[in-house]
Amino acid sequence: QYIGKPIRRIEDPRLISGKGSYVDDIKLPGEMFVAFLRSTKPHAKIHVKKTDNIFTGDDINPGKDFPIASRETTYVGQPIAAVIAKDRYEAYDLLESIEVEYEDLPYVLDPAEAIKDEVKVYSGLKSNIYFQKTFSSGNPEKILSESLTLEGELINQRVIASPIEPRGILAYFDGQRLNVWASTQSAHFMRRNLVEFLGFTNIRVIQPDVGGAFGSKIITHPEQYAVAKLAMKLGVPLKWVPTRTEEMISAGHGRDKRFKFKVGFTRDGKITALVGTIIGDLGAPYADANDDESGNVLSTSRMILGPYKIRDALITSYAVHTNKVPTTSYRGAGRPEATYFIERIVNMIANELNMDPIDIRLKNVIRPEEMPYESAFGITYDSGNYVEILNKAREYYNELKSEAGKDECVGLAMYVEITAFGPWEVARVFAKSDGKIIAITGSGPHGQGDATGFAQIVAETLQIPIENVEVRWGDTDIIEDGIGTWGSRTITVGGSAMLKASEELKRRLIEAAAKMLQADVEEIDYSEGKFTNKKSGKSATISEVISFAYKNGISLDVTYVYPVSKPTTPYGVHMALVSVDKELGKIKVKKYIAIDDIGKVINPLTAEGQIHGGVMQGIAQALYEEAIIDPQGNLVNSNLDDYAFPTAVESPKYTWTYIERGLSNHPTGSKGVGEAGAVVSTPVIVNAVENCLGKRIYKIPIKPDEL
Ligand code: MCN
Ligand code: MO
C-alpha cells in the first residue's frame, strides 16, 4: 500500500516554502549573543586576560583545556574565550578587546610526522598515537612473495562537511531546568552529553529544523558545552551561531586518511594478498571528536577488503593526533576511505593486466552461496548477490563505453558498506482520542526524509491513510530516549522500532475492538481501518474503537525499544562517463549510473535523493574539495568562495537503479542508503580519469596540473 512507493516527502511543504524554523529563527525575550575568540596558533601556551565580560576556560572548565582551552591551545580555530553581548555584532566587536598572550610551542601538522612522537601535540599526552592496531589474517607476506605486486600510497584528503546551516545553540536556564535548542543530529545524545558535563539532569534538548549535518553535528562541540554552561551560570538566554568561516575552521573536518599498500595478484586478476598501513589524522585532542573519528579509522581498516575474497591480509592502523582541528564523522565515516583505497587498487591492477573492470571484480567477489560471509577482518556481510549486480552493471557499462567519445572514459567502482548501527532505537506510536495516530522517533532526521518513511511504515502496518499519521522527533521530552541519525541507521533501526510499535498498537486496538464488539480476539477481522466481529457481522471503525478504548481505560500509547547487535551491509556498482580535457585541464562528469542493493526499499524517491546527494559529495572529493592547511596551521580556503563546493552546474546526468536481492534481517528488511553514494562515487570518478590518462593517480582532488 505505502512501503516501496515513491511517496513525496511529507517534510517538504513547510521547508520549501520558507516556513522552517532553525536555531537562529528561535528568539527568546532578552536573549544575548555569544561569540568565541579562537586561537591563531597551532600550539601555544596561552594566557587570556580576564575582565568582567570575558569568560575563559577557567569559568567553563576550571583546570582543564577542554572544551575551552585555558592554558594550552592545540589548533588554529580552537575556542579560547567567550564574550556575551546584546547581539552578534557587538559580540564580535568585543572579541577585539580581549588580550591574549601566546607562548609558541613546537607543533606538528603531518600525521606521518606526528607518529614519530618527536613533537607532542599537547603536553598532557603520553603519545600522539591515539591507537595502533593490527588486523591480520592468513600469511600475506609469503603470498606476496609468490605474486605479481603493485605498491603505492593513496591519500584520501581532509574535507569539510559544511552543511548550509552551521552548528548553533540557544540555551536558557529558567532556574530549574536547562532548555536547549541545538542544530544537532540527536537531541538525546546531546542531552546525555550535557548531563555528564554539567553534572545536572534537568535538561531538555530540542532539535528544531536542521539545515543539514553530514556527520558534523553528531558530537557535542566545545562551543555548545560552553554556551550551556554559561547559560546555567548567567540565567539569561544565550545564543551562539557561528559564521561560515568559523564553521569551516572549527567544526569537525572529515576523512584525512592515507594508505601505504602492497597488493599481490595473479596474471589472471585474482587478488591474493593485501598488506599496508593506514594512518588516520584525528587532529587535536578532544574526546568527543576523537572517540567518534577513531571509530571511523577502525571502520576503514576493517572494511578495506571490500566485497572481495581476500583472506591473506595484514593492515596496521594508526589513529594519530596532529595540531589541526579534530576530524569527525563525515558522510560514510570510514567506509568511503576503505572503498576509495580498495577500488583504486583494483583499478590499478585491472589497468596493469589490461583487464575489464567487471571481469576483474567477478573474479574476486564473494559468491552468493557464501552469504552470509565473514570477512578476514571479522565483518559479517549479511546478504546479497555481488555476481548478479556486476552482471547487471555490465549492460550499463557497455552502453556508457559505446557512448564514450575522444578523451572520454568510463570509470567503475563497487562497494560493500556497513549500515544501521545499534545499539538500539526507540519508537513511540499512540492514538489521539480524535483518531489521529502520532508516531515519534528517538532518532534525529535532518534532511533525509525519514519522517516520510516512518509514516509509510505506520500507515501500512495499521492499514490507514498516510494523512492520518503525524511524525514527530527531536525533543527529549516527547519520547523516553533515543540514539540519533547517523550511520544510515534511521529507517532500518528506527523504522523497525516504528514497525514493532505499530504492530503492538494494532494488537491493542484489536483487543479493544473485541471488547467493544463482544467477541474473542481471534474472532475479530481487521482490514483498512475497520474491525468486524466475524460471528455477528457487527463492525466498528478505527476511530470508534479508539474512542471506546479511551472511555474504558485501555492505553493506546506504545513505546518500543528495538535493539541491534550487528550492522547490515548494502552494496552496489556505480559508474561514470567522464571527459578529460588535458589542454584546458578540465574534467567533466557527463553521466553517472548507480545500481544499489539496499535491501527492501521503503521509498524509492527519498532513497534515490540520498544516492544523488551522496554521489555529488563524492564527486566533489575526487575533483574539487580539499581543506588546505598552510605550514602555520591555518585553513587557507575558509569560505565558500575559496573552498571548491560543487553546485548544480557540476552535477552530471544521473540514473539510479535498485535490486532487492539482499534483504536485511530487520523487520523492515531494509539496509541503509544515506551514505552509499558518498561511499563509492569518489573512486568511480578517479578511476575514470586514471583510465583516460593512462598513468596512476595517487592524490585527490585531481588538479589541472595532473592532466
Ligand atoms: N530509505 C529507503 N529504503 C531503504 C533505506 C533508506 O527508502 N532501504 C530512505 C529512508 O526512508 C530515508 C533515506 O532513504 O528517507 C535515508 O535513510 P537511511 O539510509 O536510514 O539513512 P539515515 O536517515 O540514517 O541518514 C543518515 C545519513 C548520514 S549518516 C549522513 S552523514 C547524511 C545522509 O544521511 N547526512 C545528510 N544524508 C543527508 N541528507 C541531507 N539532506 N542532509 C544530511 O545532513
Ligand atoms: Mo553520517
Image (cartoon, grey):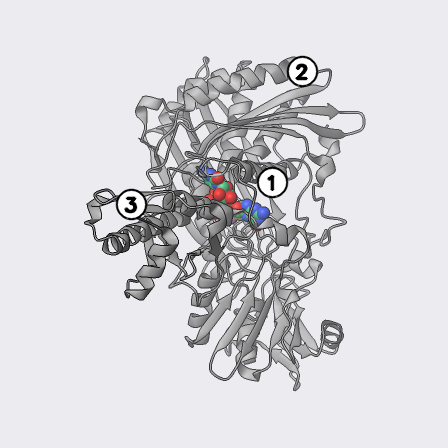
Q: Position of residue 572 (x, y in %)?
A: 48, 29
Which residue is found at the position 56% from the left and 78% from the top? 231
Which mark, by number, is residue 282? none
How far, Cα to Cα, is label 2 from label 3?
60 Å
Q: Secondary structure at mark 2?
A: helix
The answer as to whether callout 3 falls within 8 Å of ligand 1 is: no
Considering every residue shown, the one lying at the far bottom of the view is 52
Tell me if residue 642 comes above or below residue 619 in the rendering: below
Q: Are marks 1 and 2 in contact (CB under 8 Å)?
A: no
The answer as to whether callout 1 falls within 8 Å of ligand 1 is: yes
- Write down the residue under mark 2: 403
Which mark, by number, is residue 613? 1
How far, Cα to Cα, is label 1 from label 2?
25 Å
Task: Mark yes or no: residue 420 visible.
Answer: no
Q: Position of residue 624 (x, y in %)?
A: 69, 39
Q: Position of residue 224 (x, y in %)?
A: 56, 68
Three-letter amino acid code at the position of disc 2:
Glu
- Write down the residue under mark 3: 532
Which residue is found at the position 60% from the left and 78% from the top? 237
